[in-house]
Image (cartoon, rainbow, N blue to C red):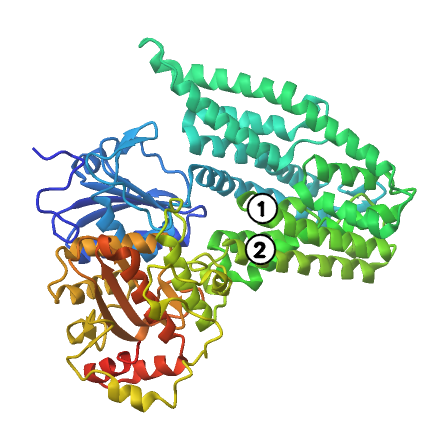
Amino acid sequence: MTSPADPPNGAGASGPGLKLLAVTACPTGIAHTYMAAEKLAQAAESLGHSMKVETQGSIGAENVLSDNDVSQADGVIIAADKDVDRSRFIGKRVLVVAVADGIHRPERLIEQVRNAPVHQGDGHEAERGAAPAASGGGKGRSVTYKALMNGVSYMIPFVVVGGLLIAVSLALGGDTTSKGIVIPDDSFWKTVNDIGSIGFELMIPALSGYIAYAIADRPALVPGMVGGWIAAHGELYDSEAGAGFIGAIVTGFLAGYLVLWIKRVKVPKFVQPIMPIIVIPIVATSALGLFFIHVLGEPISWVFERLTDWLGGLTGTSAALLGIILGLMIAFDMGGPVNKTAFLFGAGLVSKNPEVMGACAAAIPVPPLGQGLATLLRRRMFDDQERETGLAALFMGFFGITEGAIPFAAARPARVIPANMLGGAVAGAIAGVASVEDNVPHGGPIVAVLGAVGGVPMFFVAVVVGTAVTALVTIALMSVGGGGRGADADAGAGGVAEAAVAGEAASAAPSPAGAPVLAGVGSGGGTGAASAAVAAPDATAPKAASVSAAEPRDGGKAEAAPEAAEAAPEAGGQVLSGYLTEQTVRERLAADGKDAAIREMAELLAATGKVADTAELVRAAFAREDQGTTGLGEEIAIPHAKTDAVTAPVVGFARSPEGIEWGAPDGTKARLVFMIAVPEAAAGDEHLRILALLSRKLMGAEFRERLLGAADVGAILRVLGEIE
């Protein structure tokens, strides 16, 4: 009898008859959710499988999977960037990947799901004789990352709605007073402002609660939200400023893992039914609340007081230095104790020294304006959700709502917070040097528009320069750190070849799971940095000992081309030590996508008789792509696999005149596609040698042009015969 977790007999990776389910979801639930659903359904149909896809979009779940659907399913694909309840899939093979994989790699996911681990519930999975499937691009998506993004996705509506309502009410109903921009109590806009303030207050608990929910499911939601509320209200632990979004992240993870720990405690059977709805929430909420108030709260209060005293001692220092310090503090935690310390310090001196508040007012809008500008300058680095949030951040920044940048800082704090701080420091310094005055305790361009700023021209100079610095530094840090999309990185042909050899040499040694094997490829970083590590290992053949950046970029052999052509093999000859022959060359690929191209290339190699298991070769090539794209840029892709599915090294080549999207770092589509397959036993040296030979020759633009223009298979072989 077939186990419900196992596919029917004979239903292989490419065989018909699988009954598959899928769930797609993205944080915004707009474009990616439905694109992934469509691509998965189309791929299943083309492969002869049946698939039902549930979409969890912004309008709710549609095409919901029934209990009957689940009971009959052979596998489940969850393509989501937010938390999806998996409890209904216990006993089924479940493959969890990012929503982008559902869009770009649907065929590969269908290949992988039949070997996916069996979901056992409570986060535990077992393999049942199958290796866990690699989730395309998902290896780097840890539980921590997914939990954080889940919290951010649920927080964003509160930020946007609350922030925009507050901004509109201030713009249309606010009056400039010595206490700031004040809306009269009996005004309609005061009600609008109050509603917006409620949304803003719920922002921090939502972030904390849904981080906890992603880690430990529903029992963690209440402790997470209550913990977030406590973090946001400093009066509960004798602090004038709450812990802000950083405190919410801390309480979210504490609540999540505390609930996970409690769930593992063995209790009598009669207690088990009330554990998730009574015992766990009460115990976790009480423990977390008391811990934060009495243990974490005191240090936060101490920091606030010491920062206030320290700033008080700086009033005699230079205006530029004080502006830098205030700008750094304002931009650090965007509403947390450090930000509030700087703001309250400036607000307290409005009547005596308005220049201090002037520096604060210039720095306040920089984080949201800078992050919004970054999403406009490099749109491909950000997903749809971030681009939409960026537009809202620009609006909030104009009205001096620093919290508009929190979604970006929460998602990638190591890159965004330093960029915010640098931009804030620049804005504060310029405002300080120019003696910009702000006569109300509020910030942003709105205070200048309403006439509360002295030195308006320099105030706007400070804001504009600070915003530009934040945006550019954010983009730079995302590019260097791999936070952006690869298409925005620039890579020269030489850097591409060097990265390929260096990366594959590194892959010969054990590396952390999920680490990209091609150095600098697919992570948004430029590949040229890999040139420092380009020396091939000793096992590599002498001809491919290294790829030197000093060699001519065009091959440096234009004059010798005729002789090389004469020495090259005729049609039917062999190149690359005989691994590439007429049998493994195709003038034109029929495939129009990367996954389909890898399949087609594998079938091409199989024609040599050196491939014992084509399906396994395809799976190995897909697994290699999961570690980092093999699209090298300059219209080149070299997919490769080390697997015993081949009996001897074999190399194939094909052209795609239209080009295939391969995720190359320079954004070019692959028109020249090589595929290398070697047995595991030969992988240590032959694999690197072949790749080095190819990469070295493909550095030449003239060589690539001749390869693209070769008239037939014989001409292609003559050009490839120049590879030495």
Could you say which is closer to the camera, residue 563 or residue 610?
A: 563
Residue at screen point 80% across, 34% down:
308
Q: Position of residue 369 (x, y in %)?
A: 65, 55
In three-dimensional space, the C-alpha distance between marks 1 and 2, rounded to whole angstroms, equals 9 Å
Work out which quarter of the rendered image holds the N terminus and state it.
Answer: top left
Q: Amino acid at mark 1?
A: Ala
Work out which quarter of the rendered image holds the C terminus and state it.
Answer: bottom left
Q: Secondary structure at mark 1?
A: helix
In the rendered view, would you say 376 is above or below 589? above
Label 2 environment density (alpha carbons within 10 Å; few <14, some 14–19, many ≥20): some
Residue on which the image places disc 2:
477
Q: Position of residue 163 (x, y in %)?
A: 63, 45
In the rendered structure, the answer to whether residue 492 lies left or right of residue 65 reads: right
**Residue 720 figure quarter:** bottom left
Residue at screen point 21% across, 39% down:
130
Q: Position of residue 191 (x, y in %)?
A: 67, 38
Could you say which is closer to the camera, residue 122 or residue 568?
A: 568
**Marks 1,2: beta carbons within 8 A:** yes
Residue at screen point 52% across, 31% down:
252
Q: Amino acid at mark 2?
A: Leu
Could you say which is closer to the camera, residue 171 or residue 345?
A: 345
Instruction: Tell me the tag on residue 414.
Output: 1
Name the N-terminal-most of marks 1 and 2: 1
Residue at screen point 22% across, 35% down:
92
